[in-house]
Image (spheres, rainbow, N blue to C red):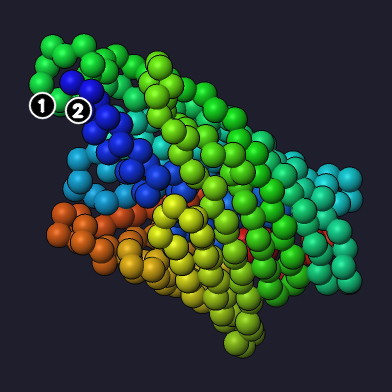
Amino acid sequence: MKFIKYTLFFLFFGCIANAQSDLNYTHFVFNKLAYNPGSTGASGAPDFTAIYRNQWMGIDGAPRTGTFTAQLPFMQKRNAFGLALTSDHIGKVKTVDIDFSYAYHIPVNANSRLSIGLNARVEQAKIDWDLANPLESGDNEIPTGMEVAYTPNFGFGTYYYSNNFYVGLSLPRMLKNALYLDKNRDFATLDVSTWYVMGGWLVPINETIEFAPSAMLSFNPQAPTDFDINANFIFMKSFWLGASYRLGDSIDGLIGYEFPSGMRFGFAFDYTLSDLEKLTTGSWEIMLGYTFKCKDCEVAHLRYF
């Protein structure tokens, strides 16, 4: 029955497009490479970050996302390469993305730079139809087995930063690729072209406390506009405590610590505000990162800029 087949596909498409095609991270301040290739190498030092997100606890098949990023400046920090590996699992669907990014940093004045970045992506998507629970079995029109699709994508971003602020604009996916296609290529492409606008500011309060607000706006004509706002307090340049709000979705708490060696650890918990509040106890994230220290870095806080 083609009706069931089409219904299953569109259910998965809708779930991916609205929930996971553009991944949400409560630690978005620490993971700008996922949204803007122009931020590649902005810390001025080699940097590694890993994040695991468990979204909507208690809901069967809810998203589970893991990501690892690496950034390497070179040639007097005017150039930088980046690598991002992302694995996302939602229901019967698994995706793996590999991103390569390059950014060129142009000095604007003694304290600020403008970076222009490009990224290339390979997307692998798998859906295991044998794990589905169809209403009717034995119908040849109902997919079975594993379907796999590979699609390329490209993007760009600009990123302006200094000692105490940053602002960026990016489109990390320019192509409108379908993540899943049946054997007959019956389905139209999925629009995942989302624009991101981000910004942050570092405000010293006294000798030991600093205030670091940040925000990110994402816009896709085919999806509701998302807006994240974050406010972190940094104590003694090592311990941070803060909160975030995701428009119509959640209010979040963050806590973390950066060791003198450059190792940092963070944890975030999201309290759901949407209609899913009745079904889930919330979401959580854990972050582990390392930034090599350098004496001549242009930015004061490697974690944010």
Q: Mark 2 points at which residue?
A: 4
Picture coordinates of residue 191 (x, y %)?
A: 49, 43
Q: Residue furthest bottom?
A: 206
Observer-nearest of 191 and 278: 191
* In the image, residue 67 above or below residue 195: above
Q: Look at mark 1 in the image and give the residue it sits on.
A: 135
**Secondary structure under badge 1?**
loop
- On the question of residue 77 being in view, the answer is no
194, 89: nearer the viewer = 194
Number of marks in the rendered image: 2
* Disc 1 residue type (three-letter): Leu
Determine the CA span between mark 1 and mark 2: 8 Å
Q: How crowded is mark 1: few (under 14 residues within 10 Å), some or many (20 or more)?
A: few
Q: Where is residue 100 in the image (x, y as percent from the top left)?
A: 67, 36
Asked if marks 1 and 2 touch (Cβ < 8 Å), the reply is yes
Looking at the image, which residue sits at the far left? 136
> Residue 94: x percent and y percent?
38, 30
Q: Which residue is drawn at 86% across and 59% down?
A: 106
Residue sitting at x 40%, y 29%: 187
| Residue 80 shows in the view | yes
Residue 109 located left or right of residue 269: right
Specify few, some or many for label 2: CA neighbours under 10 Å numbering under 14, 14-19, or 20 or more. Answer: some
Residue at horizontal 57 percent and vertical 59 percent from the top: 196
> In which quadrant is the N terminus drawn?
top left
- Quadrant of res 83: top right
Residue type (three-letter) at the residue carrying disc 2: Ile
Of residue 208 and residue 59, the one placed in the foreground of this image is 59
